[in-house]
Amino acid sequence: MKRFPVILIFTAMALAPAYGQEAIGRAATVKPQAKGTVAGTLSPNSSVHSNETISTEESGQAGLKFHDDSHLAVGPKSSVRLDKFVYEPHKGKGQMVIDAAKGSFRFSTGAQGGTKSTIKSPYGTLGIRG
């Protein structure tokens, strides 16, 4: 009988990281398939999270919309990590860091207007300022 509570504790600990991720936006479109390391297989309106990697296969595409109304389109055969997203409209603070590991993407700023937005790639880093 002493083993049962220990098993429950380890099970809860194993599930905790997935629930601890902060949702920073949602998948607006998915054609035909995209995957997230936290959300799993994405579908329209699936949440995307901070520190999540979104990847697509040969014909996959994903359109992501963040809380500040910025958009990220992820093209086929791509991998993009959503490193950091901070949006505090009442304090005038915000920051976004995206790591585009491979493939193609298109980013458009939202309410933050590019304030402290950074896009990293294997070839360099692009900083978008106001």
Image (cartoon, rainbow, N blue to C red):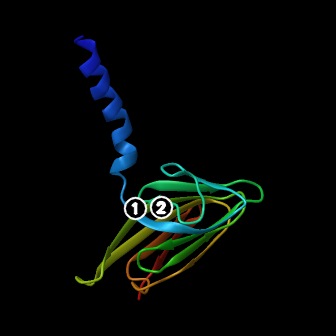
Contact, mark 1 vs mark 2 (Cβ under 8 Å): yes
* Residue 13 at x, y percent in the picture: 31, 34
Q: Residue furthest top?
A: 1
Dot 1, crowdedness within 10 Å: few (<14), some or many (≥20)? Answer: some
Reply above or below: 102 against 126: above
Give x and y (percent) for residue 130. 41, 89
From the top left corner, tell me how far across and down residue 77 is, in percent.
71, 57
Asked if residue 17 is positioned above or below residue 130 in the image, the reply reads above
Task: Give the alpha-carbon distance from disc 1 to disc 2, as whole Å.
Answer: 6 Å
Identify which amino acid the numbered label 2 is placed on. Answer: Ser
Name the residue: 48% across, 61% down.
48
Q: Which residue position is annotated with label 2?
A: 47
Give the mark, 1 or 2, whose residue is nearer the N terminus: 1
Q: Secondary structure at mark 1?
A: strand
Q: Is residue 95 left or right of residue 41?
A: left
Q: Determine which of the numbered discs, if any, sits on residue 23 in the image.
A: 1
Q: Which mark is residue 61?
A: none
The residue shown at (60%, 60%) is: 43
* Residue at 72%, 53% in the rendered image: 57
| Residue type highlighted by circle 1 | Ala
Residue at the spot x=43%, y=76% of the render?
A: 117
Residue 116 in the image, given as x and y percentages of width and height: 38, 78
Place residue 32 in its image quadrant.
bottom right
Q: For residue 42, which quarter of the picture?
A: bottom right
Relative side of 37 to 35, left or right: left
Closest to the observer, 75 or 38:
38
Callout 2 secondary element: strand
Crowding at mark 2 (Cα within 10 Å: few <14, some 14-19, many 20+): many
